[in-house]
Amino acid sequence: MFFPDPAQAPAERLAPQGFRALFRHWLLIAIRRRGVVPLELENVRHTVILTPARPPRPHLRSRRNSRRVAAVRAERRAGVVSVLCRWAGVACCAVDAGERIQELADQVVALRDAYYRGSPKVADAEYDGVEDELRGLIEANPELAPDPNPLEQVGSPVVLHAPVRHSRPMLSLEKATKSEQVVAFFDRFPGQSVVVMPKLDGLSLAVVYEDGRLARAVTRGDGTTGDDVTPLVRALTGGIPERLDAPGRVEVRGEVVMLRSTFAAYNAAHPDKPLINPRNAAAGTLRAKDPATVAERRLQFLAFDLHTDPDSAESDLDGALRTLGFTAADMRHCDGAEAAQEVISEIERRRNDLDYDLDGAVLRLADRDAYAAAGTRSSSPRGALAFKFAAEEKTTVLSDVVWDVGKTGKIAPVAWLEPVFVGGTTVTRATLANQEVIRARGIRIGDTVLVRRAGDVIPFVAGVLDAAKRTGAETEIVPPATCPSCAQPLTEQGNSRELFCTNVSCPAQTVRRLIHWASRAAADIDAVGGVWIERLAEAGILEHPSDFYRLDRERLLEFDRIGEVSATRMIDSIDASRGVGLRRALIGLAIPMASDGTAARLCRAGFGSLEEVADAGEEALVAVEDIGPKVAASLIEHLTRLRPELERLRERGVSLDVREEDLPPVVAAGAPLAGKTVVVTGAISDPRSGEKVPRPTFQRLCEKAGATIASSVSASTDLLVTGADVGASKLTKAEKHGVEVVDQGEIWQQLIDANVV
């Protein structure tokens, strides 16, 4: 160890106490140069870790002798340095470097896990210090590197949601709805055993192991490339072992779901911001940018596919997955179509008793080699089939009808029902559409009614089970004459005799308009939920959309159950919404008769700002495609009334100008849909994430691919693109006019191939 020339030091530093301080300083520098970081301990200024001396070169001594010599030298060095450290006031303890490295490695794993569960145990700087010390020790002693080394593991915080290309495409499945299609599937593979399992309604995931260790977990994404969500999966998902007793590379694919019991428990604990449904909850959890926001959620992985290299697993899929320690989704072996259909029917009967959501059944070749040999089509494997269930219908009692005030003043009847589990959730309310629907279906309070729900469609009352069984206690549903919120007289509009409150100051309308402004389709203030908007409105803080942009943290902290973190998230979310732009601002203002399509067409017609739309005359607005006199008159009337609000929004830094994304789309080169007129129907979902996609967003992507979008099917329509839960009317029209019907999956693939997405 080198010490500076004492003659170069000030005279006072040569005193014993000064020399001790000088020695302490250089001792710590020398220790740090060895890759060892002194630790701060309670009541002890520094602790020095003494790493063992490196063994002499093997050609000078035998390995056994060199270890003995190294040990002796280390012991002597420890004794000498210990004496010097005590003299210098530096606390010293001899700790084996290997033990310290393993201790730090375990600490990194534990701290990282706690971070991704949303309950970090230390500040970021302290965590970085632990990683730095571990890194320094490993650099100084590479032969003592831990296995596994957490510093090298895929899935550290810096790679969360990084794109990862799948080793094999994750394809969608061919769909079936009739028993004849099940028979045809078995006919394609004579003599082959087939497993039938529930078609889980969650998020597809590929879990990859290398030499027995979990390497990464990747979402399905677009089928070719997904997002690396390894840290979130490790922290929040059950059913995925950290290690496997299998050589080489093992890839297990399956579905991540939020169990119904977990979903119910979470919503009971978070009544102020409940999850919508288990499927969206699972997808949202693994897409979370901030792990703290999803820390209390727990997911479950259920496996349905396996690929090994080298192939060391048994050929039967179910047996191979269970041998490796994975939970599969109740696979049942069937040797014929009749047996498979019985299992499908049983799954459908039991769907409400299971702890996970499902929307059908999957048939797949049981033998892994046969499945691989069957090959694939352009977008689906040949060896599997998805049998989709029909919309679910249940009976319950209509307890009451309340009349709900919407954001545009429309008064809609809402059925209050005795709780019934249908379509994957417990339903207590359902829509009754309007008073003409009530009259046509002969529905009364007290009736036993049929409630129908499929997928994400809002539950609705389909009709009365049996009017002949009425007891006489049932009562007529009488529409109100005045608004339930402001007591102003109501007006009837349209052939359906829909009721409207025309009082723009109606309290219920005010709250609904504020909630609508904050919605995803408009300003997208996702951190401020409807419950808080209602509370802020009741407190007189929110009345107009511009009032969001006057909020600050201090004002929010005055409310119970809003802490520092929540207040900061709310304000950050509000600030991020200031760039809302013309199209989404017009949607957010909830102008009667002005739809999302109206807002999009105004942007493409050359209007540069919301003020320009307000200043345009009726003639200029009617000149825009698909905008008629009634819509134009409504725009002029309400934008004139809202002129002071537009000025307040501008003053508070909110953009009302057209955004580049809302201008006419630039058609991609080699546009796959060029020259085609396309109608889109059903619920659209992004295959890369499983999340629901607003129909206007999907339509714009189709336009970038060269399509002309139409709202209804006619003889001039080229394609009807179908999503989930398609109604019968458009399909009937398509068949009548000879229009080609294509699944959204095919269009998504074309959009991806053309680099539109």
Image (spheres, rainbow, N blue to C red):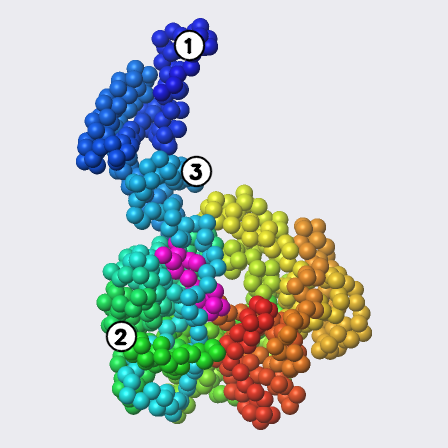
Instruction: Give the vertical position of 480 relative to 736 (above or below).
Output: above
Side of 536 relative to 242 (left or right): right
The residue furthest bottom is 736
Label annotation for residue 239? none
Residue 167 x, y percent position in the rendering? 42, 66
Q: Secondary structure at mark 1?
A: helix
How many numbered marks appear?
Answer: 3
Real-space Cα separation, disc 1 to disc 2, in angstroms: 77 Å
- Answer with the quarter of the image where residue 628 lies: bottom right
Distance in Å between CA atoms under marks 3 and 2: 50 Å
Residue at 53% across / 58% down in the picture?
526
Residue at the spot 47% in from the left edge and 46% down from the top edge:
565
Task: Please provide the residue range marked out in magenta.
Answer: 215-231
Q: Secondary structure at mark 2?
A: loop
Identify the residue under disc 1.
Answer: 6
Badge 1 or badge 3: first in the primary sequence: 1
Which of 473/363 is in front? 363
Residue at image mark 3: 125
228 falls in the magenta region: yes
Query: Where is the N terminus found, in terms of image quarters?
Result: top left
Q: Which label's residue is closer to the chain start, 1 or 2?
A: 1
Question: Where is residue 721 shown, x and y percent of the image?
Answer: 55, 80
How far apart in space, not on screen, are marks 1 and 3 (Cα)? 37 Å
Magenta-span inclusion, residue 274: no
10 Å crowding of disc 2: few (<14), some (14-19), many (20+)? some
**For mark 2, what is the residue?**
315
Estimate how packed mark 3 is, as few (under 14), some (14 to 19) or many (20 or more) residues with alpha carbons within 10 Å. Answer: few
